[in-house]
Amino acid sequence: NAGVTQTPKFQVLKTGQSMTLQCAQDMNHNSMYWYRQDPGMGLRLIYYSASEGTTDKGEVPNGYNVSRLNKREFSLRLESAAPSQTSVYFCASHGPNYNEQFFGPGTRLTVL
Amino acid sequence: AQSVSQHNHHVILSEAASLELGCNYSYGGTVNLFWYVQYPGQHLQLLLKYFSGDPLVKGIKGFEAEFIKSKFSFNLRKPSVQWSDTAEYFCAAYNAGNMLTFGGGTRLMVKP
């Protein structure tokens, strides 16, 4: 039982490049989330998926797209990366027990 | 919109000192409250959670938090900190809108 996994762990992009961050969970959770973490701002929700086949915007969705590929996988795509998207990205899934969220190890993204 | 605020951005303590980190939330309805910890270079882990019942909640590693509804507060405490408690601590609140809102985080440094 690996929990929530994310790839890659680190990535450096140039402005304008695109990439997809992958997330998978093996806990059979319905809900999955993408957050970004910036110093002093805590975690801010980018997008979430309450169940397979649905996605919704969070607090900071601009510049991102998501795909809930199946119940296990939820990917985050940056179509044209900008320096403002330099951040640490965390994926999470929503457990069945009192709304506790389980987090992946994070992806540290730098956009030059 | 719901918000969560943490009053202290940085806290420095010596080992064996007592700890209290403040957290206030703005949502007036039923909330589920959490404290997460992020050790250097690691992902977020759940310290403790409150849903209902006894307002004094005990978590892992000797941490506890008290829910005071009249003050919209959920402060984290530990009677005697250790060097290994050096980490960033996040308060979070979940409401029925399917979103977990995080505070900005408090960086705790414990000096040996």
Image: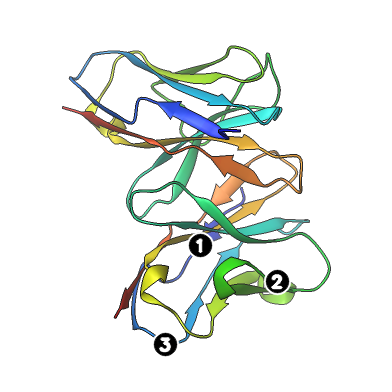
Expressed as whole percent of the image width and height from the top left, the position of residue A34 reads 50, 32
Q: Amino acid at mark 2?
A: Val
Q: Please tell me whether mark 2 or mark 3 is closer to you in this view.
A: 3
Q: Element type at marker 1?
A: strand
Residue A26 drawn above or below residue A70: below
Residue B53 drawn above or below residue A25: below
Toward which corner of the image does residue B77 lie, by quadrant?
A: bottom right
Whether labels 2 and 1 belong to a single chain: the reply is yes
First-in-chain label (3 vs 1): 1
Residue B57 image label: 2
Residue B16 image label: 3
Residue B21 drawn above or below residue A10: below
Distance from label 2 to label 3 (Cα)? 21 Å
> How many residues crowd around disc 1 within 10 Å: few (fewer than 14), some, or many (20 or more)?
many
Closer to the camera, B51 or A3?
A3
Q: Amino acid at mark 3?
A: Ala
The structure residue drawn at horizontal position 56% and vertical position 32%, both measured from the top left corner, is A33
Residue under mark 3: which chain is it in? Answer: B
Which residue in the structure is indicated by mark 1?
B5
The structure residue drawn at horizontal position 63% and vertical position 27%, both measured from the top left corner, is A26
Expressed as whole percent of the image width and height from the top left, the position of residue B111 reads 29, 79
